[in-house]
Image (cartoon, rainbow, N blue to C red):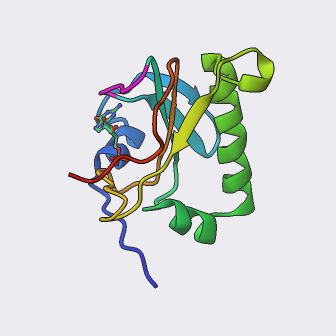
Amino acid sequence: MAYTYDTQNIFARILRGEIPNKTVLETAHTLAFHDIGPQAPVHVLVIPKGPYVTYDHFARDASDAEIVDFNRAVAQVCAMTGVQPGEGGQGFRAITNAGAHGVQEVPHFHLHILGGRVMGRMVAQAD
Ligand code: 5GP
């Protein structure tokens, strides 16, 4: 199946520097920045710089270097924000939404790192 990447999506525009962001971390293949509408005291979005629509798209088509870089960046963000449960933090939730049933708003793969409070039930009932 072919994914169609919308080059005008908001995260593509952030990556091109057209829209400002509060950067937490930038690596060769990955950018992490604070969510504009935080739903927890820690709410960071980690995105690959490449044009991937969803997690499965990224996991299927990204290079090994991109995938390793992304995952190492996630670990760094957890360390930088102090949420690592194995390192004295109180833990976090990582979420990625994909497509219509996942209720994905921005069609550029992103991982939400949420922490700083108890996150509650994993999945809420749809309205
Ligand atoms: P989704 O529903 O696609 O998983 O999540 C999209 C996230 O992007 C939301 O949490 C929303 O607050 C965040 N977001 C949308 N537009 C912007 C923006 O311009 N800047 C930042 N930093 N976050 C954004």
Q: Residue furthest left?
A: 127
- 28 vs 3: above or below: above
Asked whether 84 or 109 is in front, the reply is 84
Question: In this image, 64 relative to 38: left or right?
Answer: right
User: Residue 113, position in %: x, y?
Assistant: 53, 34
* Apparent side of residue 38 relative to residue 54 in the rendered image (left or right): left
Compared to 105, does 94 lie above or below?
Answer: above
Q: Residue at x 32, y 58 (%)?
A: 7
User: Which residue is at a point 69% across and 17% down the rendered structure image?
Assistant: 89
* Left or right of 45, for residue 107: left
Q: Residue furthest bottom?
A: 1
Quadrant hosting ligand 1: top left
- Number of marks drawn: 0
| Vertical arrangement, residue 16 with respect to residue 105, above or below | above
Residue 104 image point, x, y percent: 33, 55
Q: Quadrant of residue 97?
A: bottom left
How far across and down, in percent of the image, does residue 76 sit? 69, 29
Q: Does 70 sit left or right of 24 as displayed?
A: right
- Magenta region includes residue 32: no
Q: Which residues are magenta?
A: 36-40
Front residue of 72/127: it is 127
Query: Majority secondary structure of the magenta segment?
Result: loop
> Residue drawn at (27%, 53%), measured in percent from left and top?
126
Closer to the camera in the image, 35 or 100: 100
Q: Position of residue 56 (x, y in %)?
A: 54, 66
Q: Quadrant of residue 11?
A: top left
